[in-house]
């Protein structure tokens, strides 16, 4: 029951924030509204994180949280909200559905991860849908609309870039603490920008209506705190694929709310565009499951070498001869004083265990210095995805961390990445 309630929250609440933003920015300047919202929500989440976790972030984690806060909240969300001055809330929501398609292209450019046929088809459908959407005369009615479209594309580009880079960053392990810091930094940047540009000076608190005030409160309580908590709950209780369905449910909710509550026009061409774009996202987020999770389109081993560039290799065991296999990639962070003890523990305790696991073909253990910390890379190689599942269980994307390891780690990835490779 709680899982269903959490899905309902991320579907409906996040879909409704587009209309709530539209209501709020007609009485509170866009950047000031978004910034103040994130400042309040971030302070509450940060306070909760400090109380629950009882752990302070490091200097590097603060720096990374500020950078992510800029990309996701200041540039990403801030520009989306600003664009709603010129484009209806439903259309903004629909255009943001392009983000998963954009991430595919960015992964290709930044990581050399070439998309498969199904992903290419999904991206093509999304592009066709976008052409249908922005090609309407009523959609691009004046220069302001063009500025709005440009802002949306910059926003989803910022979101897409951040979603790729964030996995490589040292951020607080506590999701509450991490999100709170990101919201605080992002909100602070937006408020400062609003003041420096003179936007904040146009806000008249005395003229704020009940609708504008409660829209702002709704965005804090429901849009930031409640929906974020539901999202993180689902990351634990459900699967990433199911959680990703919010990418194509939110725009539908936003379109219907904008039409029903705000008299926003939905044309037949907009519906056709929505069908193309959302089908494209479905194609990308839905993996074709083949018998025994067969390996397809493997990457060369050099693709891992690029990721581990600059790292010192402690252990590197690979099978003899040419093989296709699955690389299971995990990263952790240790303070420099704990790096050698942790590496010794891995070499003496875990490495020998892996060599005896059915389906395991080898492993790589490496580390890279980053200021006062070291990034630890543990890559295990498996015969196929079925072997990975036999080792890690059905939720094989979840990292397996032994209690002893937590004594050495200051942070670690709770999910692993998998890549088909060929040696």
Image (spheres, helix red, strand yellow):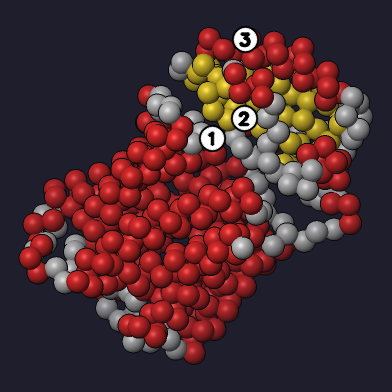
Which of 265/295 is in front?
265
Q: How crowded is mark 3: few (under 14 residues within 10 Å), some or many (20 or more)?
A: some
Disc 3 is placed on an element classified as: helix
**Alpha carbon of mark 3 to alpha carbon of mark 2: how far?**
16 Å
Dot placed on the residue nearer the N-terminal end, 3 or 2:
2
Is residue 304 in sight in this rendering? no
Q: Residue 168 carries which label?
A: 1
Reading the image, the residue beneath label 2 is 331
Disc 2 is placed on an element classified as: strand
When the figure is inspected, residue 420 is found, relative to residue 88, above or below; the finding is above
Q: In which quarter of the image is residue 4?
A: bottom right
Dot placed on the residue nearer the N-terminal end, 1 or 2:
1
When the figure is inspected, residue 260 is found, relative to residue 254, above or below; the finding is below
Query: Is 345 displayed left or right of 132 in the figure?
Result: right
Is residue 337 in sight in this rendering? yes
Query: Is 266 displayed left or right of 79 in the figure?
Result: right
The quadrant of the image that shows the N terminus is: bottom right
Residue 375 spot, x, y in % from top left:
57, 23
Q: Residue at 39%, 60% (x, y): give it.
A: 223
Reading the image, the residue beneath label 3 is 340
């Amino acid at each position: 029951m709680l899982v269903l309630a959490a899905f309902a929250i991320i579907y409906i609440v996040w879909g409704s924030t587009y209309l709530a933003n539209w209501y709020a920015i007609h009485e509170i300047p866009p950047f000031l509204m978004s910034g103040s919202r994130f400042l309040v929500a971030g302070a509450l989440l940060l306070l909760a994180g400090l109380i629950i976790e009882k752990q302070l972030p490091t200097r590097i984690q603060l720096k990374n949280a500020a950078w992510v806060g800029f990309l996701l909240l200041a540039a990403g969300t801030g520009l989306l909200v600003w664009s709603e001055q010129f484009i209806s809330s439903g259309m903004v929501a629909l255009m943001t559905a392009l983000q998963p398609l954009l991430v595919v292209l960015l992964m290709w450019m930044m990581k050399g991860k070439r998309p498969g046929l199904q992903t290419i088809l999904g991206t093509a459908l999304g592009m066709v849908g976008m052409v249908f959407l922005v090609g309407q005369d009523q959609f691009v009615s004046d220069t302001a609309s063009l500025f709005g479209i440009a802002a949306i594309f910059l926003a989803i580009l910022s979101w897409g870039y951040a979603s790729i880079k964030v996995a490589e960053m040292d951020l607080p392990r506590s999701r509450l603490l991490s999100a709170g810091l990101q919201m605080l930094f992002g909100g602070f940047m937006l408020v400062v920008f609003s003041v420096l540009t003179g936007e904040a000076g146009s806000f008249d608190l005395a003229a704020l209506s009940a609708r504008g005030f409660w829209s702002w409160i709704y965005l804090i309580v429901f849009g930031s705190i409640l929906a974020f908590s539901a999202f993180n709950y689902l990351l634990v209780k459900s699967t990433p694929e199911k959680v990703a369905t919010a990418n194509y449910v939110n725009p539908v909710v936003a379109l219907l709310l904008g039409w029903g509550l705000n008299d926003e026009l939905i044309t037949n061409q907009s519906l056709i565009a929505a069908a193309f774009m959302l089908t494209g996202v479905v194609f990308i987020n839905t993996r074709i499951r083949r018998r025994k999770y067969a390996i397809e389109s493997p990457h060369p081993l050099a693709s891992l070498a690029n990721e581990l560039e600059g790292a010192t290799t402690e252990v590197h065991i690979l099978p003899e001869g040419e093989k296709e296999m699955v690389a299971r990639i995990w990263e952790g962070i240790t303070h420099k004083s704990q790096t050698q003890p942790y590496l010794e523990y891995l070499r003496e305790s875990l490495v020998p265990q892996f060599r005896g696991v059915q389906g395991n073909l080898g492993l790589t253990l490496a580390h890279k210095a980053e200021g006062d910390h070291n990034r630890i890379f543990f890559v295990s190689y498996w015969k196929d995805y079925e072997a990975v599942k036999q080792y890690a269980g059905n939720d094989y994307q979840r990292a397996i961390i032994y209690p002893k390891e937590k004594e050495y780690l200051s942070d670690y990835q709770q999910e692993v990445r998998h890549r088909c490779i060929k040696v």
